[in-house]
Amino acid sequence: QVELVESGGGLVQAGGSLRLSCAASGSIFSFINYVMAWYRQAPGTQRELVAVSTSGGSTNYADSVKGRFTISRDNAKRTVSLQMNSLKPEDTAVYYCAATRPDNINYWGKGTLVTVSS
């Protein structure tokens, strides 16, 4: 079993920054081979993909956050982070860390709330 714990959420004014972190623990054979991602879910909406860090080292972002958010990972520490700059009220959501094993088994964190005030 893999446990993911997010941290770093909070209340910030529009235009501000936050850094989310996700720490993975448990039965992880090779973290470097996991695809790590951040998702978010605002009230009344479906969960959406925000950013992905693949096992090959590439990254992808939702169009809505390109140029503002940066995903990074530390394979030695088994962590993944999401640096969020120029935050907007529409970025308000619960942010979830997700890990996908090479055999496509998925794990989810419990989420951390980000609130951006206007």
Image: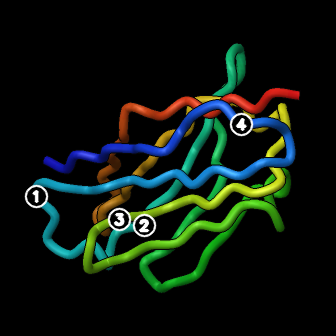
- The disc, 3 or 2, on the residue closer to the chain's N-terminal end is 2
Which quadrant of the figure has residue 103? bottom left
Q: Which residue is mark 1?
A: 27
Q: Which residue is mark 4?
A: 12
SS at mark 3 in the image: strand
User: Residue 50, how many percent across, how many down?
Assistant: 66, 51
User: Residue 72, how many percent across, how many down?
Assistant: 52, 72
Q: Amino acid at mark 2?
A: Val
- The disc, 4 or 1, on the residue closer to the chain's N-terminal end is 4
- The disc, 4 or 2, on the residue closer to the chain's N-terminal end is 4
Q: Which residue is mark 3?
A: 79
Q: CA distance from mark 4 to mark 2?
A: 29 Å
- Residue at point 13% right, 47% down? 1
Q: CA distance from mark 3 to mark 1?
A: 14 Å
Q: Amino acid at mark 4?
A: Val
**In the visual, does 76 lie left or right of 82?**
left
Q: Amino acid at mark 3?
A: Thr
Q: Which residue is mark 2?
A: 35
**In the visual, does 83 lie left or right of 112?**
right
- Location of residue 55 with respect to 87 vertically, above or below: below
Tell me whether circle 4 and circle 1 mark residues in contact (CB < 8 Å).
no
Q: Amino acid at mark 1?
A: Ser
User: Residue 48, how many percent across, how many down?
Assistant: 66, 40
Which quadrant of the figure has residue 68? bottom right
Q: CA distance from mark 4 to mark 3?
A: 23 Å
Point out the frontmost of discs 4 and 1: 4
SS at mark 1 in the image: loop
